[in-house]
Amino acid sequence: MMNLNETLPICIAGQWRLGGGERYATLYPATGEPVAYLHAASVADVEEAIAGADHAFRTSGWAQKNPHERAAVLYRVAQLIRERGEALAQMQRLDNGKPISETRNLVASAAGTFQFFAAACETLEETLTPMRGDNLTMSVYEPMGVVAAITPWNSPIASEAQKMAPALAAGNAVVVKPAEVTPLAALELARICIEAGVPAGMISVLPGKGSVIGDAITLHPLVKRVSFTGGTTTGKHIAHIAADKMMPVSLELGGKSPTMVFEDADLDHAVAGVLYGIFSSSGESCIAGSRLFVARALYDGFMERLAAGAAALRVGDPADERTQMGPLITARHREGIERYVDIGVTDGGRIRTGGVRPKGEKFERGYYYTPTIIEGLSNDQRICQEEIFGPVLVAMPFDDEDDLIRQANDSVYALAAGIWTRDYKRAWRIGRAVQAGNVWINTYKQFSISTPFGGWRDSGLGREKGRLGILQYMEQKAMYWGMNEQPLPWAG
Ligand code: NAD
């Protein structure tokens, strides 16, 4: 593991050295104290990393290895992540302030992702397609070359694994641009990949400002694909660049996901699920269930239980195993959330619980905020439409299914939705009618690496995960083998 007491080197096509950009500190969100110092990458570093990656792609032999040989290396990556799991989880806790119970899950998910794509790599089949003449026809896949992974700060190691594992499995070189405030997991993951046997030049990690480093990577002609997770505005900017380059992209973007609770729901499950859906990860989650619709007959009683549950959540020290909600990522992000709460109140919303910073000495230095529920607004108002990316739930009653579906779908986002009912026919009806990339029925925020993930509309483009996720990092090629005994008729 890297030594956080030294200024950290970054990884430029396998070369570890100080970045050429400005020196900065990453801060522990629970205390505001520095965790590590490093220099951001410079634009010259980007140039060198991509040239080095392209060279490694052409000469290291990684892309030419048999799939089971690449898979063996990726299985070893999974194994090393597991062996160092606790240290990685603690490092990630410092990196972004998530509770330790959550960072342990993210580390386990990163290991699972490498294992899964190792398996996908060695079992990927190319196709012999039905012949329609004297040609043997096949569909095969090639790696793309240098691909980029641009990730946000909210789930570092898992986001990076989700892109690095399939990209490497496919035979590509990867340039990772982690969020400026959370670079540690990506740097450590790069070390692990190289130690496991990925040729060093195939991996770069370039921390720094998105508008400088991210842009330089996206614009670079040798970068053949960008896999991006982050905000919708940034995603659209990347899509414009991609259009000019005719470059494929996948964009995992924001959300404002509806959760719907019907009269016949199992209320214990629904209360726990709604709380988990919005307040886990302090609401800093693209799939947070941030808009709640509750059947009117149930509304008052349900909200009573929900508000009591929210107020009882254990907010505090991320190092404490029992903590459910840690601090927010930065002081600035907390201020943004507070502005949204103010807008909600100015627009006529009532704070049912929360809406303040928690009091007490242990909260003074960190960027904490209480779990907040706001009622009394309608779905078209600003805080019901815009992504807050924090622990703020807006709750509204609904009267009938048609009106519910209209409201649930009335959003520029369409990433996820939750349905709580015992009636399986209704769950099916609503589940099919709601527009979202991911629908959870009587559960929420559950993931499987074997199930494709992505959003509709402003929530994104393309899918990650799933066995075929590896194909996103490959170019398809059709091959025709002439089997004719005679020349083509035209010749004669
Ligand atoms: P962001 O868009 O500001 O940044 C994401 C990444 O993009 C960072 O590494 C950043 O440095 C980089 N970046 C910024 N400007 C860039 C540019 N011009 N060119 C290239 N790269 C650039 O988002 P954030 O604040 O880090 O993360 C929060 C957002 O991410 C939220 O909107 C959230 O919903 C979204 N998110 C989506 C998913 C998903 O899977 N759909 C998952 C997690 C987070």
Image: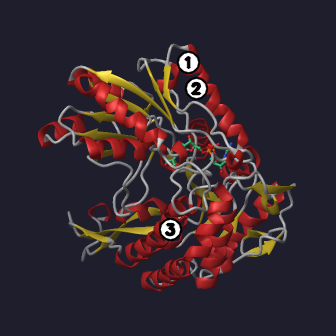
Residue 277 circle label: none
Tell me if label 3 and label 2 are in contact, CB under 8 Å: no
Which residue is tagged 1?
Answer: 345
- Whichever of labels 3 and 2 marks the residue nearer the N terminus, that label is 3
Taking depth in this image into account, of 45 and 391 the one nearest to the observer is 391
Residue 280 position in % (x across, y down) = 48, 49
Residue 75 position in % (x across, y down) = 47, 81
Residue 210 position in % (x across, y down) = 71, 47
Displayed quadrant of residue 234: top right
Estimate the spatial distance between the alpha carbons at disc 1 and disc 3, rounded to whole Å. 40 Å
Taking depth in this image into account, of 290 and 138 the one nearest to the observer is 290
Which residue is tagged 2?
Answer: 341
Tell me if label 1 and label 3 are in contact, CB under 8 Å: no
Residue 247 position in % (x across, y down) = 56, 50
Q: In the displayed structure, does residue 15 sit left or right of residue 296?
A: right
Does ligand 1 reach within 8 Å of label 3's beta carbon?
Answer: no
Identify which amino acid the numbered label 3 is placed on. Ala
Q: In the displayed structure, does residue 42 sit left or right of residue 491?
A: right
Give the quarter of the figure containing the N terminus: bottom right
Q: Single out the mark in the foreground, 1 or 3.
A: 1
- Residue appearing at x 70%, y 47% in the figure: 366
Neighbour tally class for label 1: few under 14, some 14-19, many 20 plus, Cα within 10 Å: some
Estimate the spatial distance between the alpha carbons at disc 2 and disc 1, rounded to whole Å. 6 Å
Which residue is tagged 3?
Answer: 110
For the question of whether residue 284 can be seen, the reply is no
Q: Secondary structure at mark 1?
A: helix
Tell me if label 2 and label 1 are in contact, CB under 8 Å: yes
Taking depth in this image into account, of 404 and 116 the one nearest to the observer is 404
